[in-house]
Amino acid sequence: MNIGIIGSGMVGQALATKLASLGHSVMIGTRDSSKLAEWLGQAEHPIAVGSFAETAAHGELVLNATAGGASLAALELAGVENLRGKILIDIANPLDFSQGMPPSLTIANTDSLGEQIQRAFPEVKVVKTLNTLAAPLMVNPGQLADGDHHIFVSGNDAEAKAQVSAFLKAEFGWKNIIDLGDISTARGTEMLLPVWVRLWGALGTPMFNFKIVR
Amino acid sequence: MNIGIIGSGMVGQALATKLASLGHSVMIGTRDSSKLAEWLGQAEHPIAVGSFAETAAHGELVLNATAGGASLAALELAGVENLRGKILIDIANPLDFSQGMPPSLTIANTDSLGEQIQRAFPEVKVVKTLNTLAAPLMVNPGQLADGDHHIFVSGNDAEAKAQVSAFLKAEFGWKNIIDLGDISTARGTEMLLPVWVRLWGALGTPMFNFKIVR
């Protein structure tokens, strides 16, 4: 599948590396391709680099892996004409580092970044997921407790959520995905970040995840 | 032990019933004792009823089980003179039902109810815990997956957190308690409520909890 990944930080690189290794045609979008030279030089599988617009146009499926504070601007550059009708997997969190560590959120409680993106791009099928754990675990959940832990999907389009869930199961090996409801449920998963950050501090590692025990 | 429980709703009643059954001298505080008559008539073990002030004075250990929006006012009525130097286990969440269901939070992100209580009562040792799951599970974690799930403690006084953790293990059978850090980490656990509420909707039951998988 042609996959476009908007954002080339740690999350974008982890997703691109994994998806390229699975044989997908991956383009990663950046405003500064020079900073990716070293990483691309070490890549075992070909990964294309493009502008945000080229990346969005390339993807049959598009992933938002930008920093939350930059997401709306990056998606504007990607262009509604390149996103229209597509599924956009939104992994970004609206973290606010302006007051130092640990970060708070720039958006919380009665709104979410997922909703803001959906409102800005009503013709895009936004599915919020994977935003509640560290990048290495996103693409390889089985390395932790044989995958016995959870992620969540939030979105207004039931078919899009089903497609994304099937994709995450088939490509990354996710076993446990809970559909929380419409895109407003992204408030809940984005508001997991404050405790996630504190758990990182308490546990001394970001390699953990939430399991919903019933 | 003499235990005072401020607040007589579902959480306060569950805590009082369990702690009385364990032989503690429990007083439950309410502004309207008449509404507790039926419940007290069915209680198998004696539970005293008092004003908030009487209840705080009774407790060597005091629990805040009020609704979050009423907590500060209830604790003012309880009286600093009756709380000074004591451990206050804060279980309340600042839920905002003013816009209907699901609730949002009245305090979030850069502050928390736990911090507000600690600031209002600097001579009280506030320990935030038990606020991330349903009342029946607070007092009986073993009924779910044999207790293989987590709660958290937040507070500025390390010794108070250790005492509360020991109490929760001995009295209720908690096995897994993570110390997140100072009282500002209550932001994280209070901000778990929005996803908790949505999980209740998605799962169709409040009888679940978070496990931190490492």
Image: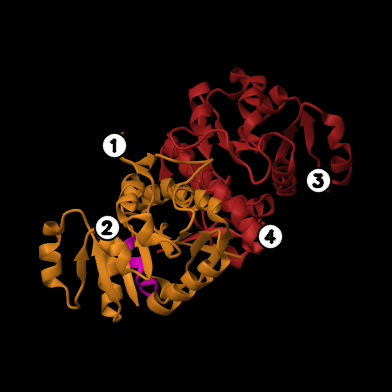
Chain colours: A red, B orange
- Residue type beneath disc 2: Phe
Q: What is the crowding at mark 1: few (fewer than 14 residues within 10 Å), some, or many (at least 20)?
A: few
- Say whether residue B137 is magenta: yes
Relative to B31, A68 lies left or right: right
Q: In the picture provided, is B208 more to the left or to the right than B43? A: right
Query: Residue B124's spot in the image, x, y percent?
Result: 46, 59
Instruction: Please report contact status of discs 1 and 2: CB closer than 8 Å, yes or no.
Output: no
Rounded to the nearest whole Å, what is the CA distance between mark 2 and mark 4?
42 Å
Q: Is residue B71 left or right of residue B212?
A: left
Residue type at numbered disc 4: Thr
In the rendered image, residue B21 lying in the magenta stretch gets the answer no
Marks 4/1 in contact by CB < 8 Å: the verdict is: no
Judging from the image, mark 2 belongs to the subunit labelled B
Residue at 85% x, 34% y is A35
Q: Both on one chain, marks 4 and 3?
A: yes
Q: Which residues are magenta?
A: B134-143
Residue under mark 3: which chain is it in? A
Residue toward you, A93 or B20: B20
Residue A45: which disc? 3
- Look at mark 2 in the image and give the residue it sits on: B52
The percent position of residue A111, horizontal first and vertical second, equals: 46, 32
User: Which comes before the other along the chain, label 4 or label 3?
Assistant: 3
- Report the disc number at residue B100: 1
| Picture quadrant of residue B132 | bottom left
